[in-house]
Image (tube, rainbow, N blue to C red):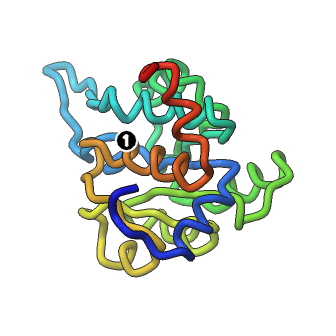
Amino acid sequence: MSVAYDAAILERAAKVKLFIFDVDGVLTDGGLHYGAEGEAFKTFNVQDGLGIKLLQESGVLTGIISARRSPQVTARARDLAIEFVHQGGHDKLTPFKALLEQQNLSEEQVAFIGDDVVDIPILSRAGFAVAVPNARPEVLARAHHVTEHRGGHGAVREICEFVMRAQGTYDRVMAQFLA
């Protein structure tokens, strides 16, 4: 890593066994686009998607917990083989706790990236709490780390690579492309 990071942040990232992503404002830029018939459209960053696939390849489980329910998210999660998807409802803490119990993981072993106040209950508990730079001030105050890139514009790819580097898996995973 070219930038010097606090040892405590690297230690948190090194413990991650499950990374959970918020959607709107993190995997997307937060914009909702509507067609003439009222259908909603979301735009996902392809580099973020590859970042998730590479993180999975490194051995980290992935999940989505989103307050909104969307068929686009279901399709994107399926495309990326994301293991756990929960959509609908501002109570994100209940599915978070259920997932930890199901996977027999501690909060310390989980990373979460969010941007808005509905994410605070998880951010306050996750071992590695991450926010995008355009997150609400209350979220930024609770994050262990803030990405340089904005949501929907490479933040997810950036943090996936950060975790892989902290865990020493980046070079192994990238070797297939850089050989």
Query: Between 31 and 179, which is closer to the camera in this rendering?
Result: 179
Residue 5 occupies quadrant: bottom left
Residue situated in front as seen by the camera: 132 or 15: 15
Residue 150 horizontal/vertical position (percent): 25, 53
Q: What residue is shown at x 61% (from left), y 40% (from top)? A: 62
Note whether 155 is above or below 73 in the view shown.
below
Q: Residue at x 19, y 30 (%)?
A: 34
In the displayed structure, would residue 75 be above or below residue 150?
above
Under tag 1, what secondary structure? Answer: loop
Please state if 62 lies on the left or on the right of 33 as rendered.
right
Q: Which residue is mark 1?
A: 27
Residue 22: horizontal and vertical position, in percent?
46, 49
Is residue 166 rendered to the left or right of residue 148? right
Toward which corner of the image does residue 91 lie, by quadrant?
Answer: bottom right
Given residues 90 and 119, the one toward you in this image is 119
Q: Quadrant of the N terminus?
A: bottom left
Looking at the image, which residue is at 37% across and 35% down? 48
- Residue drawn at the location 31% of the way across and 31% of the way down: 44
Q: Position of residue 46 (x, y in %)?
A: 33, 26
Q: Amino acid at mark 1?
A: Leu
Q: Quadrant of residue 169?
A: top right
